[in-house]
Amino acid sequence: MSGENVISDLIPRPEDGPGDGRKMKKTLQGLLGSGEAMIPAGGFPGPEQVHDIRVNMKKARAILKLLKGSAGNAWYTRENSEMRDISALFSSSREADVVTKTIRLLSRKDPEVFNAEVVMWLKSAASTAIAGNSSEEVGNRVAAEAADRLRRAWYRVCFVNLSTVDEEHLLDGLWESFLRAEVAFGKARVTHYHEHIHEMRKRVKDLLYQTGFFSRYNPEHFSKLYSELDEIASVLGKCNDISVLWSMVADQARQLADKEYLTLERTFAAVRTAMFSGIEQRTLILFRTFYTARS
């Protein structure tokens, strides 16, 4: 990333006018409404729709964090918890889509360990784990519950007043998100543990989605910031997918010979660590720029 002061150009100034409360409200309604629309009546959404619904909930929760100071803690707590629970309803169905992509990624990263035989074993082990957590009847009930909760959340947003959102609160919310991401990054750099990388991913996602509401202050620089955050978040997502796949097959892998188990465990971790290491410097530069601008 260039040395341009990207972040400072996004910070609102008094002459820029009122906050983006109305825009945020419309966006929240759009995210909730489109999420409900992706759930077929009496059925379960497909893999792409499940992914999009979960992304919608992440974006909605990122917006809620920005609005917390203006709309109140009670409203934030209730709606954030509800949207987190809606996303969680689809977590197990997301696994099947993750498996195929992640196995393909692993075989590219280390074809010697993840050869054709191991790939077949991974697919079988993952399929067994997924089959134990799903059924069509349960899936349809989950989808119906999610649609109902999305509809109710949409109506609740209709009655919250966000027309005079305070810009200072918005900026404070963005800064808090950055600080959380920075702390998570610090832990992940030291340990490379899955839990810390996963936490960093969540915090970077918040920061990514929230920057969208500051775009009008300087669209040119905003696009650079958004692009950097998006690429970092994408790599962190792949790191998380590797960890999710390992958690799915680990119990069955323990039935293998000790040498085979240890080889798989270490290679999973090594691929994840190598991918994370590839974005460390970029993240460090980006976060330093953010901190310098705010200071």
Image (cartoon, rainbow, N blue to C red):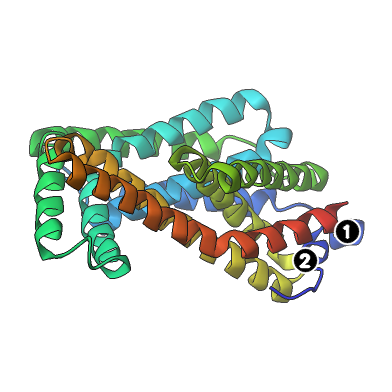
Q: On the picture, is 259 further left or further right than 279?
A: left
Sequence order check: which comes first, mark 2 or mark 1?
1
User: Pointer 2: residues within 10 angstroms few (<14), some, or many (20+)?
Assistant: some
In front of the other: 218 or 28: 218
Q: On the picture, is 25 further left or further right than 266?
A: right
The three-letter code of the residue at mark 2 reads Tyr
The answer to whether residue 256 is visible is yes
Q: Return the x and y of residue 69 as percentages of the image width and height.
A: 73, 34
Pick out the residue farthest to the right: 14
The three-letter code of the residue at mark 1 reads Arg
Q: Return the x and y of residue 41 as percentages of the image width and height.
A: 19, 45
Identify the residue at horizontal 27%, vertical 54% (top origin): 98
Tags 2 and 1 touching, CB below 8 Å:
yes
Q: Return the x and y of residue 53 as percentages of the image width and height.
A: 36, 49
Choose top left, top right, bottom left or bottom right for residue 88.
Answer: top left
Disc number placed over residue 196 in the picture, else none: none
Indicate the secondary structure of the residue bearing disc 1: loop
Quarter of the picture containing the N terminus is: bottom right
Pick out the residue farthest to the front: 259
Vertical order, 97 against 131 (above or below) = below
Identify the residue at horizontal 44%, vertical 45% (top origin): 57
Q: Which residue is mark 2?
A: 217
Choose top left, top right, bottom left or bottom right for residue 71.
Answer: top right
The answer to whether residue 12 is visible is no
Choose top left, top right, bottom left or bottom right for residue 65.
Answer: top right
Q: CA distance from mark 2 to mark 1?
A: 9 Å
Report the label total: 2
Q: On the picture, is 289 further left or further right than 254?
A: right
Q: Which residue is mark 1?
A: 13
User: Pointer 1: residues within 10 angstroms few (<14), some, or many (20+)?
Assistant: few
